[in-house]
Image (tube, rainbow, N blue to C red):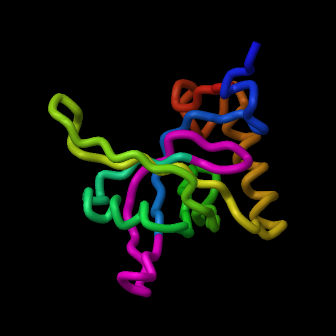
Amino acid sequence: MSESASERRKSRRLSITADVIVSMMIPEETFTPNSVRGYGLEISQLGMSVKTYQLSQEEYTALMKGVRYARILLFLPYYEDPLDFKAALMWSDYHAYPGNDKPHCLLGFRFNNMAPGDVAKLEDAYNRLSRDSVSDVPRNAVRLED
């Protein structure tokens, strides 16, 4: 019997709703990073997924033409400053069809070359998010997914 995707995962994912800013560069077009706002959907100790309404279908198509690296600023209620991660874009999906909410893009990132301090912050945030109740976060704002 083959194992499911959740059984293959190395780290448990947490559903979240947290503001993010993702900056990605498309060097064949410009050396100025394109920053978009969105929100985190899920986070693990290895990466996260983001939903944004700020990428056009043309920008999405340009992202698919090569390996893309990003800087992700993740805003959580536990910290005064956002968590700052470097990541690689592993997958993306553009949604624009009748009956759907306005066109949006889903982006999946794997965290890269994290400094020890960033690893500690991510572990702390992950542990706080995975608790059953946290005073700063409404109980239903975080849902564990295996």
Queried whether the magenta region covers residue 34, the answer comes back as yes
| Residue extending farthest bottom | 31
Percent position (x, y) of residue 81? Answer: 59, 66
Q: Is 19 in front, or is 93?
A: 93
Quarter of the rendering occupied by the N terminus = top right
- Residue 43 image point, x, y percent: 62, 43
Give the side of residue 1 with respect to residue 41, left or right: right
The residue at the point 79 percent across, 70 percent down is 115
Q: Residue furthest left?
A: 98
Residue 129 is situated, as x and y percent measured from the top left of the image, at 67, 38
Query: Vertically, is 3 above or below 70?
Result: above
Q: Does residue 43 sit above or below 79 in this rendering?
A: above
Q: Which residues are magenta?
A: 24-48
In this figure, what is the number of numbered marks? 0
**Image side of residue 98 versus residue 72, left or right:** left
The reply, left or right, for residue 141 in relation to residue 36 is right
**Residue at left 31%, top 65%?**
59
Q: Residue at x 30, y 58 (%)?
A: 54
Residue 38 is a magenta residue: yes
Residue 36 is situated, as x and y percent measured from the top left of the image, at: 37, 64
> Where's the C terminus, which quadrant?
top right
Q: For the view shown, which residue lies furthest in the right direction?
A: 116
Closer-to-camera residue (5/112): 5
Q: Taking 97 as reference, is 25 above or below it?
A: below
Quadrant for residue 29, please give it.
Answer: bottom left
Q: Residue at x 30, y 47 (%)?
A: 104
